[in-house]
Image (cartoon, rainbow, N blue to C red):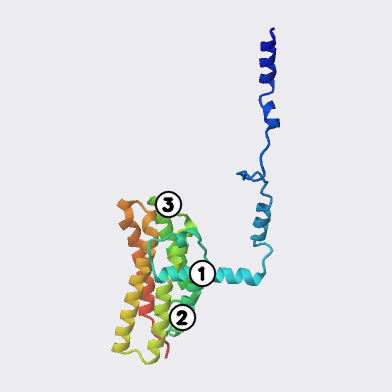
Amino acid sequence: PTANQRLSAEEASRPFAGLSDVSISEDIPVEGDISVPVASSRRDEEFSTLDEPVKETILRDLRAVGNKFIHVLYPKRSSALLRDWDLWGPLLLCVTLALLLQGGAADSDDQGGPQFAEVFVIIWFGSIIITLNSKLLGGTISFFQSLCVLGYCIMPLTAAMAVCRIVLIGGSGTVSFAVRLVVVTASFGWSTFASTAFLADSQPPNRKALVVYPVFLFYFVIGWMILTFSPSQ
């Protein structure tokens, strides 16, 4: 080969050989960052909840439950209850409602009044039936997400039961019944509206009525138990 061919072959074998003579002034900023991000794993370890105190864990869970109560009080099409679901709030509301329904006249007369276990079973069994109905109709939310929404939306009815117990202290006449009827009706409508607001987007558009109807019956039964409650003499 000729000298020019040998020179071309050497340049081809060393394509960046000429860059060794290039110097970059310190005044010229060089863009880019090639440092290895070694602190990411440390940050993940810092935010781990395995080593956090029990007090912090309890307070964090209580704040999460409180935020979900606020979402029920001001219902809107939000995924907060669906994204961060839990069953602590529904369990608390169910136990509170069952305790408030104890001590009625039907209990003392052995007339089949709602016992603690019966209220507990009615609420949870009803929620499971509604959840299965929603899944069979093509709902896109999980089983426990639906239980979470239905359980948290019992809160207006639980508050209504507390108000009714206070009203019944003054007697069980016509005025008392009228006040309780208004309170229970408003809480029943609020619970139904709040639950459907959270579950509406997870159902097929042509089957929403089939999902709302069991929810309506579920809260109606709970509202009827609250309205017909009368304290023992």
Residue 117 vs 8, above or below: the answer is below
Q: Mark 2 falls on what kind of element?
A: helix
Judged from this view, the residue extending furthest toward the top is 1
Query: Which numbered dot is residue 125?
Result: none
Q: CA distance from mark 2 to mark 1?
A: 21 Å
Q: CA distance from mark 3 to mark 2?
A: 35 Å
**Image location of residue 221, percent across then percent down:** 37, 71
Left or right, 142 with respect to 16, comes to left
The answer to whether residue 36 is seen in the rendering is: yes
Q: Give the residue number, with chain letter if any, for mark 1.
A: 65
| Label 1 Cα crowd, 10 Å radius (few <14 / some 14-19 / many 20+) | many
Q: Quadrant of the C terminus?
A: bottom left
Q: Mark 3 falls on what kind of element?
A: loop
| Label 2 Cα crowd, 10 Å radius (few <14 / some 14-19 / many 20+) | some
The quarter of the picture where residue 170 lies is bottom left
Nearer-the-camera pick, 121 or 166: 166
The quarter of the picture where residue 202 lies is bottom left
Residue shown at the point (31%, 80%) measured from the top left: 182
| Label 3 Cα crowd, 10 Å radius (few <14 / some 14-19 / many 20+) | some
Q: Give the residue number, with chain letter if any, for mark 2.
A: 100
Q: Mark 1 falls on what kind of element?
A: helix
Is disc 3 in contact with disc 2, using a CB cutoff of under 8 Å? no
Nearer-the-camera pick, 211 or 28: 28
Residue 161 vs 78, above or below: the answer is below
**Image location of residue 25, percent across then percent down:** 66, 41
Q: Give the residue number, with chain letter if any, for mark 3.
A: 140
Whichever of labels 2 and 1 marks the residue nearer the N terminus, that label is: 1
**Image location of residue 36, percent across then percent down:** 68, 46
Q: Amino acid at mark 3?
A: Thr
Residue shown at the point (36%, 80%) measured from the top left: 228
